[in-house]
Image (tube, rainbow, N blue to C red):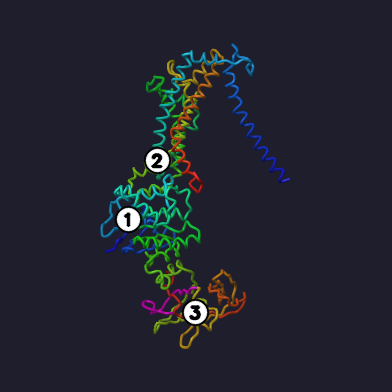
C-alpha cells in the first residue's frame, strides 16, 4: 500500500509536469501558427493555408513599427540604468550591517509586490503634479522602477554566495578594498548581475500595465500598441506582432547570455566549488 | 627584538570588552598558540594584528614599528583563513601569485617564486586547477602557499586544522610545522583545540574573557596550570575541593569535602593553607597500588569500585566510583593485561607530585 502511494505520487508529478507544459506551450504554439495563417479573415485553428501576409502587414504598419522601436529603445535604456543602480544598491545592502537592514531590503524590493496598475497610476499622478508630460521620459521612469527590484534581487543573490573572507584574504595579500572588489567580488557576482539585466530587459519589453498609463500619442510600446489594436481592428497582425516581440526579447536575452557567457562558465565553477569538474 | 609585540592591547565593542589589556611578544621563527573557548578574544586579537580591527588602547608592533593606522594591505601579514578563502575563479598559480602582484614584486621574478611555493607545499601537477577541484588538504596547502609567498613578517593561522578530518589533521599538522620551519616563519596560531595549540606552538597562551590566563610552553601549561580554568581547558581532569592545611617540607595535608584525605605538594602562596581545588590527571592514577608505592614516598590511596571500562584500542578509559559517589576517570595503556571487571572493588593511587593544587574557584 505504501509503495502504491509512492508510485502514484511519482506518476502524478509527471502528469502534473505534462499538464503545466501543455498549458504554457500550447497557447504560444497556437499564436505562432495563427500568425502564419493564409486566410483573409480570423478563422478556425489550424489554418488550411499558410502565408506571411500578417507579417507583411506588420512591417508596413507604422503604428506597430513605432511601438517596436520605442519598446526596444526603452528596454535597452531601462536595463542599463536599472542594472547599474541595482548593482550599486545590492552591494551597499550586502555590506551594510547596521540596524534596519531588513527594512531597507524590503523597501528596495517593494515594487515587486505593489500591483503594476497601482504603480502606473501613481506615476501618472506624480508626473502630472511635477509637470512631466513627455511620454518617453515617463515610460522610462516607470520601466526603471518596475525592473529595478529584479536587478537588486539577483545581484544580492549572487553576492550572498561570496564569503567575506575572500575580500579579507585579498586585502591581507596587499590589495586595497577597491582592488579586492574588482578582482574578487565583481567577477564572482557577475552571473547574478547578468541575470538581473536579462530579467529587466524581458520585463520591460513585456510590460503593459504600467506603460498603459504613461503612454503619450507619440510614445507607446509594442504591447500597448497591440492592446489598442485589439480594441479597434482585431486581426492576426497582433499574432505576428506577438511573435516579433517574442523573437526580439529572446534574441536579446541570448545575446546578453552570449556576451557574458564566457565568464558565466567561470561563474558556474564558482557556485559549485566543491570538487566537480568544470 | 621581537618580530611581533602587543602591549596593553584592549578592544571594546560598546560596553563589551572583547580583549582586555593583553601583552605578549613573539621572537623570530617561533610559533605562539592563542588558545581559548569561543568568545575569549583570540580571534579579535588575530584581527587586530592583521589590521581588520583597530585596538582602542595599546599598540601592535612589528619589529618595533607601531602599526597604528595601517590598513591590512599596508602590513606584511600572511593570513591562513579557517575556510581557506581561496579565490574560486583563479587557478592554484593565480591564487599564489595574487599577493606577489599586489605587494609590488618584480614581475619577472613572480613565476619563480610561485614555482618555489608550489614545490614547498608539494602541489606540483596541480598548478592550473581551480580550488573547487582540489581536496580539503590540498586547498589548505594552496592557502598556506599563498600566505607565505610574499615573505610575510608575521604569519597568522586561524584554526588551521579544524576543517579537516581527524586522520588528515595529524598528517597535515606535521607538514604544517615543517613548512613553517622551512621558511622560518614567525607564527601565531589561533585555536580552540588544545591538541592543535600544544602540538604546533612553541609556547601557548590560554585566554578567557579577553584576558590572558596563562602563558608558557605546552608541557608547562599542562603540568603546572595556575588556575582551575586552565587545568580544565587543557586535558582531562579529576577534581577534589577542600581544605588545605599549612604545609611543611613542600608537602601538605588536604582534606576533601567528601572526607578523603590526601597529601599534595605546596609552594609559594599555598603554604598558609585555605580553600583549594586539587586536580589529578586520569593518566597519573594507578589502579594497582603496588606499582606506585616504594619505600619512603607517601602515596595517596583511595578505595573505589569500577563502574565502566571502555577499550579504545591503545587506551583503556575506566570510570571508578569512590566515597561519596564521586566518579573518577582513569586512563591506562592497554598492553595486553587482564582487564578488571565492572563492579570490581579496587584500590586506586597517585603520588602527591601528580596532584595539581589551584586556588578554589579560579
Kindly check if marks 1 and 3 are in contact, taking CB atoms under 8 A apart as contact: no
Q: Is residue A209 visible?
A: no
Q: Which chain is disc 1 placed on?
A: B
Chain part drawn in magenta: B264-281
Chain to which mark 3 belongs: B
Asked which quadrant contains residue B272, the reply is: bottom left
Q: What separation in Å lies between label 1 and label 2 (alpha carbons)?
A: 28 Å
Q: Which mark is residue B350?
A: 3
Q: Is residue B171 above or below residue B14?
A: below
Which residue, given by chain and number where applicable, does mark 1 sit on?
A: B151
Under tag 2, what secondary structure? helix
In the rendered image, the vertical position of residue B223 relative to residue A134, given as above or below: below
A214 in relation to B58, above or below: above
Please state, as top left, top right, bottom left or bottom right, where the N terminus of chain A lies in the image.
top right
Write the residue at 54% across / 17% down. Answer: A238
- Can see residue B286? yes
Residue A20: horizontal and vertical position, in percent?
62, 31
According to the picture, the residue beneath numbered tag 2 turns out to be: A186
Rendered location of residue B172, percent (x, y): 45, 60
The answer to whether residue B112 is left or right of residue B316 is left
Amino acid at each position: 500500500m505504501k509503495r502504491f502511494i509512492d508510485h502514484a505520487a511519482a506518476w502524478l508529478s509527471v502528469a502534473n509536469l505534462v499538464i503545466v507544459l501543455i498549458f504554457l506551450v500550447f497557447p504560444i504554439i497556437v499564436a505562432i501558427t495563427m500568425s502564419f495563417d493564409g486566410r483573409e479573415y480570423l478563422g478556425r485553428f489550424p489554418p488550411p493555408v499558410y502565408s506571411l501576409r500578417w507579417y507583411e502587414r506588420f512591417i508596413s504598419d507604422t503604428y506597430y513599427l513605432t511601438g517596436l522601436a520605442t519598446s526596444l529603445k526603452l528596454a535597452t535604456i531601462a536595463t542599463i540604468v536599472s542594472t547599474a543602480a541595482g548593482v550599486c544598491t545590492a552591494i551597499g545592502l550586502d555590506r551594510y550591517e547596521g540596524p534596519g537592514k531588513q527594512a531597507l531590503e524590503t523597501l528596495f524590493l517593494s515594487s515587486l509586490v505593489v500591483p503594476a496598475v497601482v504603480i502606473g497610476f501613481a506615476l501618472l499622478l506624480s508626473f502630472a503634479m511635477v509637470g512631466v508630460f513627455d511620454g518617453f521620459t515617463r515610460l522610462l521612469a516607470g520601466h526603471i522602477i518596475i525592473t529595478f527590484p529584479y536587478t537588486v534581487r539577483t545581484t544580492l543573490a549572487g553576492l550572498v554566495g561570496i564569503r567575506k573572507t575572500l575580500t579579507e584574504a585579498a586585502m591581507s595579500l596587499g590589495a586595497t578594498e577597491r582592488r579586492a572588489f574588482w578582482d574578487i567580488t565583481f567577477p564572482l557576482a557577475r552571473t547574478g548581475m547578468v541575470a538581473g539585466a536579462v530579467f529587466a530587459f524581458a520585463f520591460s519589453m513585456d510590460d503593459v500595465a504600467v506603460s498603459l498609463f504613461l503612454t503619450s500619442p507619440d510614445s507607446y510600446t509594442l504591447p500597448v500598441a497591440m492592446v489598442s489594436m485589439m480594441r479597434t481592428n482585431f486581426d492576426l497582425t497582433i499574432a505576428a506582432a506577438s511573435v516579433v516581440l517574442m523573437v526580439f526579447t529572446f534574441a536579446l536575452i541570448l545575446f546578453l547570455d552570449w556576451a557574458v557567457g564566457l565568464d558565466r562558465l567561470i561563474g558556474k565553477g564558482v557556485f559549485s566549488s566543491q570538487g566537480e569538474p568544470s | 627584538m621581537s618580530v611581533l609585540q602587543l602591549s596593553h592591547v584592549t578592544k571594546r565593542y560598546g560596553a563589551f570588552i572583547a580583549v582586555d589589556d593583553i601583552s605578549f611578544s613573539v621572537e623570530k621563527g617561533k610559533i605562539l598558540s592563542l588558545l581559548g573557548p569561543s568568545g575569549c578574544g583570540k580571534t579579535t586579537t588575530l584581527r587586530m594584528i592583521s589590521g581588520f580591527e583597530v585596538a582602542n588602547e595599546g599598540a601592535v608592533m612589528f619589529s618595533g614599528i607601531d602599526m597604528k593606522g595601517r590598513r591590512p594591505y599596508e602590513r606584511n601579514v600572511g593570513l591562513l583563513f579557517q575556510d581557506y578563502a581561496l579565490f574560486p575563479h583563479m587557478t592554484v598559480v593565480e591564487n599564489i601569485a595574487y599577493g606577489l602582484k599586489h605587494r609590488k614584486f618584480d614581475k619577472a621574478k613572480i613565476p619563480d617564486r610561485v614555482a618555489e611555493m608550489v614545490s614547498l607545499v608539494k602541489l606540483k601537477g596541480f598548478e592550473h586547477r581551480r580550488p573547487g577541484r582540489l581536496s580539503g588538504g590540498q586547498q589548505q596547502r594552496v592557502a598556506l602557499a599563498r600566505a607565505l609567498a610574499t615573505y610575510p613578517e608575521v604569519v597568522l593561522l586561524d584554526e588551521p586544522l579544524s576543517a579537516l578530518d581527524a586522520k588528515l589533521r595529524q598528517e597535515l599538522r606535521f607538514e604544517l610545522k615543517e613548512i613553517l620551519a622551512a621558511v622560518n616563519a614567525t607564527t601565531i596560531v589561533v585555536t580552540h583545540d588544545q591538541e592543535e595549540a600544544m602540538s604546533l606552538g612553541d609556547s601557548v597562551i590560554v585566554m578567557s574573557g579577553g584576558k590572558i590566563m596563562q602563558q608558557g610552553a605546552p608541557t608547562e601549561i599542562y603540568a603546572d596550570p595556575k588556575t582551575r580554568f586552565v587545568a580544565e581547558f587543557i586535558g582531562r581532569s579529576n577534581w577534589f575541593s577542600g581544605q588545605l592545611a599549612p604545609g611543611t617540607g613542600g608537602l601538605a595535608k588536604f582534606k576533601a569535602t567528601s572526607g578523603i584525605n590526601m597529601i599534595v605538594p605546596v609552594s609559594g602562596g599555598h603554604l598558609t593553607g585555605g580553600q583549594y581545588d586539587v586536580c589529578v590527571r586520569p593518566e597519573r592514577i594507578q589502579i594497582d597500588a603496588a606499582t606506585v608505592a616504594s619505600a619512603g614516598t607517601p602515596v595517596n590511596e583511595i578505595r573505589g569500585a569500577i563502574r565502566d571500562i571502555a577499550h579504545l584500542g591503545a587506551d583503556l578509559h575506566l570510570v571508578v566510583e569512590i566515597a561519596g559517589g564521586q566518579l573518577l576517570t582513569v586512563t591506562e595503556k592497554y598492553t595486553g593485561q587482564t582487564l578488571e571487571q565492572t563492579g570490581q572493588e579496587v584500590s586506586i593511587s597517585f603520588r602527591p607530585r601528580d596532584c595539581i593544587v589551584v586556588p578554589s574557584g579560579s
